[in-house]
Amino acid sequence: MSTRRYAFSWDFVGNIHDGRPNLGNSARIEVYRLFQYTLRDIIELRYGTTESEEVMRESGKLAGWKFCERFVGRRERFDDFVAAVQKALLDFGIGIMRIESANYETLHFTLTVAEDLDCSGLPDKEHTVCHYDEGFLAGMLLAQTGEEFYVRETDCWCTGDRTCRFEVRPQPQMATSNA
């Protein structure tokens, strides 16, 4: 039986105070993007563009779920949850989230993230790049609701927009067969 070496644990974050007594918990955006986009490059070379985007969504989903559990928590009211997420994203310098439209009965939302950590300031690419963010948002919603969500970016800094816009809705349930 093999054990996984890298199953996520907050132990991988470590004790920042002891480990970085002079530099602390901050690093420049360039370093974050260097890590993300070189990792994406290698994943895409090995597995193709579609699979690399899906890997980014899946890792973002895990990160969003764990981030939400640790720094946001579940809230009784959905509006309180949204406010707590907005504050956490701002406090951590991830981005400025706004809800453009919301249908609380169907859990269908359009939201934006301005000054997005992943793409704000990048050159136009004629395609969206925030697949990690799609997963991150889905993971936070999963942590709050226990439900799977489908999140897709419709506008991005890299498509010429100056904010990232996401369509969010519950993931369709797969039909089960008794055959």
Image (cartoon, rainbow, N blue to C red):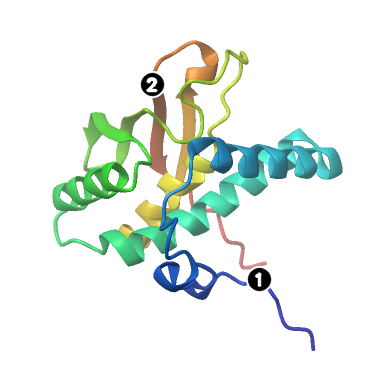
Q: Which amino acid, by three-letter code, is at mark 1?
A: Tyr
Residue 113, x across and y down, in percent: 35, 31
* Mark identifier at residue 134: none
| Residue situated in front as seen by the camera: 41 or 110 | 41
Residue 57, x across and y down, in percent: 57, 45
Is any atom of residue 171 visible in this view?
A: no
Q: Which amino acid, by three-letter code, is at mark 2?
A: Thr
163 to 172, vertically: above or below: above
Q: Tag 1, which secondary structure?
A: loop
Left-right relation of 176 to 18: right
| Residue situated in front as seen by the camera: 85 or 145 | 85
Q: Tag 2, which secondary structure?
A: loop
115 to 5, vertically: above or below: above
154 to 130, vertically: above or below: above
- For marks 2 and 1, the one nearer the N-term is 1
Residue 96, x across and y down, in percent: 29, 33
* Mark identifier at residue 163: 2
Q: Residue at x 81, y 37 (%)?
A: 48
Q: Residue at x 50, y 46 (%)?
A: 135
Residue 82, x across and y down, in percent: 22, 46
Q: Residue at x 70, y 45 (%)?
A: 39
| Residue situated in front as seen by the camera: 29 or 66 | 29
Q: Which residue is mark 1?
A: 6
Task: Give residue 161's quadrant in the image.
Answer: top left
Seen as rendered, the residue at the extreme right is 46
> CB of mark 2 within 8 Å of CB of mark 1?
no
